[in-house]
Amino acid sequence: MLQEGNDRTITPQKLDPRYEGDTWYPVTHRRLIQENGKYYLVGRHGGRYTAKGEYNFVTINGHTYVAKPSTAGHFDISQGALQVDCACTIRFGYSAGTRGAIREWANNSAHYQPSPDFAWQSGLPVELFKRH
């Protein structure tokens, strides 16, 4: 377990045992960062894009990685990790004035089945969290 600020201890969200034998597929994922109140996706070569639309994401050791649901599931994004800090979906605004702003995020992941009690481990605004 990792220690987080405010005396909270990060509790790893474990892979559901039913999926331990699953194969994960290498996918292109991007790192999610926040800068000046706006969220961006950073590619492996450093290119930055304003976040828009819906993504699956996993948080591992305080870093959040995202991919479009049509291209990757949580297990693929985590590269087959047996535990993660958080595994959820996130939705950003799509229009010019709302890109980079989180509309909502939820704890829906079949592989990890994250408990809503640990939503804070994502590092995202908890007030925008929707229980799945």
Image (cartoon, rainbow, N blue to C red):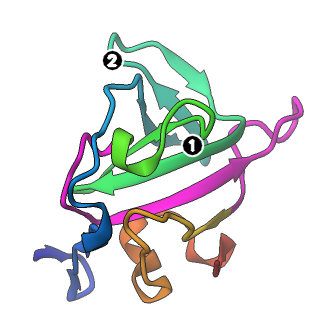
**Location of mark 2 (residue):** 44
Between 2 and 29, the one nearer to me in the picture: 29
**Nearer-N-terminus badge (1/2):** 1
Q: Is residue 43 left or right of residue 124?
A: left
> Total label count?
2
Name the residue nearer the viewer: 101 or 119.
119
Q: CA distance from mark 1 to mark 2?
A: 21 Å
Q: Quadrant of the C terminus?
A: bottom right
Left or right of residue 49, residue 122 in this image: left
The three-letter code of the residue at mark 2 reads Arg
Indicate which disc residue 126 carries.
none
Q: Which residue is mark 1?
A: 36
Disc 1 secondary structure class: loop
Above or below, 25 against 7 in this view is above
Q: Residue at x 20, y 52 (%)?
A: 81
Residue 76: where, in percent of width, then height?
36, 40
The amino acid type, in three-letter code, at marker 1 is Asn
Residue at 48%, 65% (x, y): give it. Answer: 110
> Which range is magenta?
78-104
Residue occupying image coordinates x 18% and y 60%: 82
Where, by quadrant of the figure, is residue 27 drawn? top left
Residue at image position (56%, 76%) is 126
In the image, residue 56 sits, relative to residue 11, either above or below, namely: above
The N terminus, quarter of image = bottom left
